[in-house]
Image: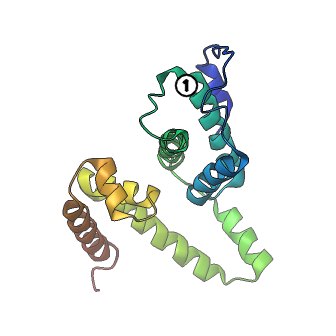
Amino acid sequence: MSANLALRHATPLPVSRTPSAIRQLTQAQVQKLRAFVHKRVMNPDDADDILQCTFFEALRNEHKFQHASKPETWLCGIALNLIRNHFRRTYNQPYQESLDDQTNVAHEQHIDIGQCVDGSRQLQRTVEAIQTLPTAMRQVIHVSLVMDGNYQETAQSLGVPIGTVRSRLSRAREQLRRSIDPFA
């Protein structure tokens, strides 16, 4: 992710003589937001970019803050939206790895090349099986992964009852098991 993304659509920040609630956050509150982002995005560079974009968006839109919640809650909402956008961009691109890369890893780590190839085939079958799932099932799998498997947050994000999330995930898992290993 690039911080340039937020800067491309940047409008000048309003200059205010009185410090806003966003500008008055304590170091502890900033650290909590940093932990919130880093927990959800494993790549530290991407997480830092998202954190920076969160503050940029908050400052750019601070005039829209209604004070109906704490500023930290509002910032977490902005960060969560940026995290979702990050994962959409990241995981909508097909992953491809050359056989040379797999061979180099195997030689460096003294791993059996057969295991690497089998793992790669299994991963490819899994990705293909996920792509054959109905849209609702694919969507609930994706959102569930973004939400760290939290059914309640997944249900809220999708706007469906929690039971619907559970049943769609259960049916998706079963369908994936049958697709990947028909003898299971």
Q: Is residue 173 visible?
A: yes
Residue 18 or 121: which is nearer the viewer?
A: 18
How are the colours assigned in the image?
rainbow
Residue 43 at x, y percent in the picture: 67, 55
Q: Residue at x 31, y 76 (%)?
A: 177
Q: Is residue 156 above or below residue 99?
A: above
Task: Identify the residue at horizontal 69%, vertical 52% (top origin).
Answer: 28
Q: Residue furthest front?
A: 18
The C terminus, quarter of image: bottom left
The image shows residue 111, relative to residue 82, as above or below, that is below
Q: Residue 61, can we see it?
A: no
Percent coordinates x, y for residue 74 in the rendering = 49, 39
Quarter of the image holding residue 2? top right
| Residue in the picture at 55% in, 43% down | 72
Which percent across, then down, holds residue 1? 63, 40
The three-letter code of the residue at mark 1 reads: Glu
Camera-nearest residue between 50 and 140: 50
170 sits left or right of 6 in the view: left
Residue placed under numbered mark 1 in the picture: 62
